[in-house]
């Protein structure tokens, strides 16, 4: 895909993030891999006002690829670090969806209470410890929580998802929020019983057999 078309897709993904109800204002950010780096949403610019030309092109160390750009998202380091360490990832979505954030405010991830937890690549979703947004420590914690997974919660902050495409990362972020909401509701009756390691392995196998969630 040429860069202009990808820019348009990033803008659409950012707007879809808010339209889907899993983010509000400019509290999230979206990036997509390009040759030698990434395109990322600018900091603090409402998505309705944002056009393809407002996106910021950075290399994977966070250096600008083009002169005279807007300031990148304050979370550029998180996006660049993920894309640098995960060659299979093509896009990153970060947002402050309500239920995932509520769990993360308790430092809780999502255990295998429901089989769809496996959609993020493992038998649970971890929660990264709190650190100041935009910092290397915050990014390092998020990357550790993402190990072997495509999604993680971020303590006192939100969630982050990676995908083989913008659409996949966005869909996963919506799924993570749905799982978090279901888990919070299940917790109202007490800690729900969890699926076993074997049951979750079978779900992974079924996902692989059916190519579930791979597009
Ligand atoms: P930006 O507007 O800088 O992308 O910041 C939002 C955010 O998610 C901070 O964590």
Image (tube, grey):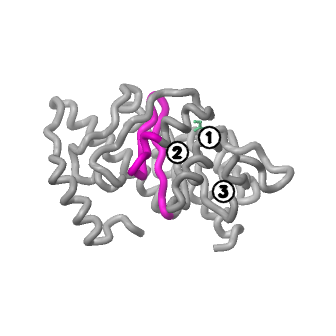
Q: Looking at the image, which is closer to me, 5 or 108?
A: 108
Q: Reading the chain from its start, which is encountered first: label 3 or label 2?
A: 3
Q: CA distance from mark 2 to mark 1?
A: 9 Å
Q: Reading the chain from its start, which is encountered first: label 2 or label 1?
A: 1
- Residue furthest to the right: 68
Tag shown at residue 173: none
Q: Is residue 192 visible?
A: yes
Q: Secondary structure beneath disc 2?
A: strand
Q: Give the residue pinned by disc 2.
A: 94
Asked if 116 appears above or below 186 in the picture, the reply is below
Q: What segment is highlighted magenta in the picture?
A: 144-164
Disc number lying in front (3 or 2) = 3
Is 47 situated left or right of 87 in this image? Answer: right
Q: Is residue 166 visible?
A: no
Asked if the residues shown at circle 2 and circle 1 are in contact, with their CB atoms under 8 angstroms apart, the answer is yes
Ligand 1 is within 8 Å of the C-beta of the residue at disc 2 = yes
Q: Secondary structure beneath disc 1?
A: loop
Q: Residue at x 22, y 48 (%)?
A: 114
Tag shown at residue 38: 3
Asked if 47 appears above or below 208 in the picture, the reply is above
Q: CA distance from mark 3 to mark 2?
A: 15 Å
Is 115 situated left or right of 79 in this image? Answer: left
Graded by Cα atoms within 10 Å as few (under 14), some (14 to 19) or many (20 or more), the crowding at tag 1 reads many
**Residue 186: x %, y % from top left:** 20, 37
- Quarter occupied by the C terminus: bottom left
Tag shown at residue 75: 1
Ligand 1 is within 8 Å of the C-beta of the residue at disc 1 = yes
**Residue 155: x %, y % from top left:** 44, 30
């Amino acid at each position: 895909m040429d860069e202009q078309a990808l820019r348009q897709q990033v803008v659409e993904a950012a707007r879809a993030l808010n339209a889907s109800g899993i983010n509000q204002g400019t509290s999230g950010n979206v990036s997509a891999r390009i040759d030698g780096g990434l395109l990322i949403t600018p900091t603090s610019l409402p998505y309705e006002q944002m056009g393809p030309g407002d996106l910021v092109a950075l290399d994977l160390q966070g250096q600008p690829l083009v002169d005279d750009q807007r300031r990148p998202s304050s979370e550029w380091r998180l996006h660049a670090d993920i894309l640098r360490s995960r060659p299979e990832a093509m896009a990153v979505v970060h947002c402050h969806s309500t239920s995932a954030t509520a769990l993360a405010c308790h430092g809780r991830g999502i255990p295998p209470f429901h089989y769809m937890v496996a959609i993020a690549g493992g038998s649970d979703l971890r929660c990264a410890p709190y650190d100041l947004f935009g910092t290397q420590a915050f990014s390092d914690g998020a990357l550790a929580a993402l190990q072997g997974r495509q999604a993680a919660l971020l303590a006192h902050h939100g969630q982050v998802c990676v995908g083989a495409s913008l659409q996949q990362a966005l869909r996963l972020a919506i799924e993570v929020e749905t799982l978090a909401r279901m888990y919070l509701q299940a917790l109202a009756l007490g800690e729900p019983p969890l699926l076993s390691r074997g049951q979750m392995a079978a779900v992974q196998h079924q996902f692989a057999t059916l190519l579930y969630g791979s597009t």
